Amino acid sequence: MAHYQVFHPDHEVIGQIALEIQTAIGGENIYPIYERHGLTNVNPRAWYPMQNLLDVFNDFEARGGAMFDLVSVGMKTVENLVLPPEASNFHLLEMFQLSAQIYLLNSRGSNIGTIDCEALAPTHVKLTYIVPMPSDFMYGIVYAFGRRFSVPGTPITVYYDEDIPRREDGGAATIIHARWKPQR
């Protein structure tokens, strides 16, 4: 079982993210887990300890079958991310390149980890995550990010780097690739 832990205890997450995760799984099923970790009556604009949210993920892992839940909540999270104002005018590649900035708008603290985006081609990015969140959660974010910010109907393929172990498997980082058809 993975145990997700913040890099520094002052790491916080905006309440909107916690709310999205709760609604992605189904409020009545996840409410007892949220209650156990102090995430009831969440204010979308307030800040909460990231460890509380990671403890929810740890509970997902403990009960088994977490991969689908984590991908689902990652996808749901993208619906209401806090975005920089200029983002509405950007195309998909530029949005992926803003990943680190978007992370900083939704998380705060002295050591929250890092996200790096490398454009390998105009329609292929490699995202390197050194963050305390589960890899499958980040996978869901990448997939939904591609769907939300691409031209409607653009096929997107998301996959883990096969040559590098994910953080949960002892790797230094989780690397996720996203490829899509050229946008017109």
Image (tube, rainbow, N blue to C red):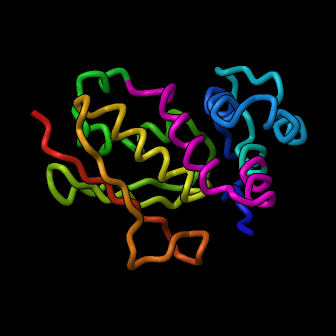
Question: Residue 151 in the image: x percent, y percent?
Answer: 22, 30
Residue at 14% x, 37% y: name it.
183
Question: Residue 57 in the image: x percent, y percent?
Answer: 72, 51
**Which picture quadrant has residue 124?**
bottom left
Residue 63 lies in the magenta stretch: yes
Question: Residue 28 in the image: x percent, y percent?
Answer: 81, 29
Residue at 27% x, 57% y: name it.
118
Q: Is residue 44 left or right of residue 153?
A: right
Q: Is residue 101 left or right of residue 54?
A: left
Q: Quadrant of the N terminus?
A: bottom right
Q: Is residue 109 above or below residue 78?
A: below
In front of the other: 184 or 84? 184
Res 14 visible: no
> Which residues, given as a range, are shown in magenta?
56-84
Q: Is residue 154 left or right of residue 10?
A: left
Residue at 78% x, 44% y: name it.
52
Res 73 visible: yes
